[in-house]
Image: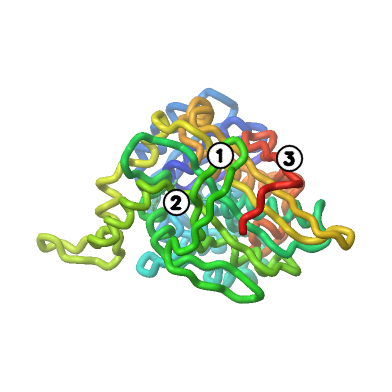
């Protein structure tokens, strides 16, 4: 069917690449291009010959638009799947625009020097992408991604109007380390040490970091503490779900994780302000990343499950209705299949599916769109087929 250029070769990319190779009818050819080419070569060596997908590799600095343009012109992909870091979103979008190539990512742009993520920078490409006749699909991971598709599906099939959404992200995995992050530590810690916020009655309500705590009894997992965080899909769902009154996002954290994080914060290790150390400028959070376990090394040791989903409340045929859509994923099952734990798996699978939606022309709208703006049905079918089956409940426990 076509060619996909995958940028980045970390935890999420590794899963997406395994899935592209499994899906060789669609992904006839892929190129894996990242900063460290040896990682791309190692993955190619592992996967070559396991399916019909032809794999090539390249070195690229995704901060450099000219390098990206040269690579895209050389490989001529149908889609560029950006699985590098959020800092590279705009340079990769620039290169896609210059070469008239479709673009997919899993996380919105964040300037490296201010831990603030919002869509305005990427939405600013709308008209240019529309005129160029190409598509940018934003946020094709799990959250954002699957949670946003869940919202579009609930609206299409279960509700006349959705008024409340609670997005619940539970990772009950245990990796046995006192402190480690399940995906890129720098991105993860920036996210959880920021102020929380939720959307209510047309505006943001800001909270202190981890100020709002709830306990929830997750299906197939049990009771866990969860905390309200700011999360990027709230911004686009607030615009795309008519009649919405409130959207909140909660993520589970164990007490040990929070105690370690507090201590690291108190001593200044999570700061993104550069400091001088022995004549060299370093960023404490980047140094911390270097001493923490590599998330990719957690796969073999992580046991337990994740449960991520959304509770919707609204109206159907004039009556109040509640609906919960979620996916449960087992860390060890993921590891057996693709050599990664469930946090990378739950992001990498929808990244592959998003690229597939554009490559097959199933989703074909020109411009820049968040994932909930497309027809959710083919994506929901693909989740069941490609390893993230979803479950539904019409009588879930609610979050107060
Ligand atoms: P990793 O740190 O494991 O991987 C990032 C990859 O990008 C690495 O291979 C890295 O190269 C490469 N990279 C970084 N900078 C550049 C650059 N300038 N040029 C080329 N390559 C570069 O991160 P993850 O796999 O955990 O996360 C990937 C993305 O997925 C992130 O944007 C993250 O925010 C997003 N994400 C989204 C989720 C969702 O549900 N929507 C959930 C989890 C993550 P090198 O190997 O040299 O370091």
Nearest to viewer (mark 1 / mark 3): 1
Residue at label 3? 381
- How far apart are the two marked residues, 1 and 2, measured between alpha carbons? 34 Å
Q: Earlier in the sequence, mark 1 or mark 3?
A: 1
Queried on whether the Cβ of the residue with tag 2 lies below 8 angstroms from ligand 1, the answer reads yes
Q: Earlier in the sequence, mark 1 or mark 2?
A: 2
Residue at label 2? 84
Image vertical order of residue 10 relative to residue 319, above or below: above
9 with respect to 80 (left or right): left
Q: What residue do we see at 31% from left, 41% from top? A: 178
Residue 145, label in figure? none
Mark 2 nearby-residue class (10 Å; few <14, some 14–19, many ≥20): many
User: Label 3's element?
Assistant: helix
Q: What residue do we see at 45% from left, 55% from top? A: 68
Q: Is residue 33 visible?
A: yes
- How far apart are the two marked residues, 2 and 3, measured between alpha carbons? 27 Å
Mark 3 nearby-residue class (10 Å; few <14, some 14–19, many ≥20): few
Image vertical order of residue 156 relative to residue 395, above or below: below
Q: Quadrant of the C terminus?
A: bottom right
Residue at the left extreme of this rendering? 278
Residue 222, label in figure? 1
Q: Earlier in the sequence, mark 2 or mark 3?
A: 2
Q: What residue do we see at 20% from left, 66% from top? A: 275
Q: Is residue 65 visible?
A: no
Q: Position of residue 180 (x, y in %)?
A: 35, 44
- How far apart are the two marked residues, 1 and 3, measured between alpha carbons? 27 Å
Instruction: Name the one closer to the observer, 208 or 180.
Output: 208
């Amino acid at each position: 069917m076509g060619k996909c250029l995958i940028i980045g070769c970390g935890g999420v990319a590794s899963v997406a690449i395994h899935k592209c190779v499994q899906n060789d009818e669609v992904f006839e050819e892929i190129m894996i291009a990242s900063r460290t080419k040896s990682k791309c070569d190692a993955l190619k060596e592992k996967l070559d010959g396991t399916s019909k997908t032809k794999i090539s590799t390249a070195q690229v600095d995704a901060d450099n638009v000219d390098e990206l343009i040269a690579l895209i012109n050389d490989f001529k992909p149908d889609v560029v799947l950006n699985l590098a870091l959020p800092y590279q979103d705009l340079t990769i979008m620039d290169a896609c625009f210059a070469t008239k190539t479709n673009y997919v990512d899993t996380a919105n742009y964040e300037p490296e020097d201010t831990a603030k993520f919002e869509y305005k920078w990427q939405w600013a490409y709308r008209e240019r992408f529309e005129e160029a006749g190409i598509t940018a699909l934003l946020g094709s991971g799990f959250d954002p991604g699957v949670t946003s598709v869940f919202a579009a599906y609930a609206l299409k099939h279960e509700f006349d109007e959705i008024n409340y959404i609670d997005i619940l992200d539970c990772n009950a995995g245990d990796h046995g380390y006192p402190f480690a992050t399940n995906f890129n530590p720098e991105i993860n810690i920036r996210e959880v040490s920021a102020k929380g916020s939720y959307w209510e009655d047309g505006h943001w309500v800001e909270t202190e970091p981890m100020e709002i705590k709830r306990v929830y009894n997750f299906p197939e997992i049990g009771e866990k503490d969860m905390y309200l965080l700011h999360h990027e899909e709230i911004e686009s769902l607030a615009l795309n779900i008519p009649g919405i009154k409130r959207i909140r996002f909660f993520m589970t954290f164990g007490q040990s994780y929070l105690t370690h994080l507090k201590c690291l914060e108190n001593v200044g290790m999570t700061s993104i302000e550069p400091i001088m150390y022995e004549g060299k400028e370093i960023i404490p959070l980047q140094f911390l990343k270097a001493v923490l376990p590599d998330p990719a090394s957690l796969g073999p040791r992580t046991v337990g499950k994740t449960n991520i989903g959304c509770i919707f409340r609204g109206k159907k045929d004039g009556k109040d209705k509640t609906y919960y859509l979620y996916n449960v994923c087992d860390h060890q099952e993921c590891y057996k299949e693709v050599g990664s734990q469930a946090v990378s798996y739950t992001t990498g699978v929808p990244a592959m599916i998003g690229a597939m939606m554009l490559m097959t022309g199933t989703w074909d709208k020109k411009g820049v769109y968040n994932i909930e703006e497309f027809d959710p049905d083919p994506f929901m079918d693909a989740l069941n087929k490609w390893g993230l089956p979803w479950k539904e409940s019409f009588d879930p426990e609610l979050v107060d």
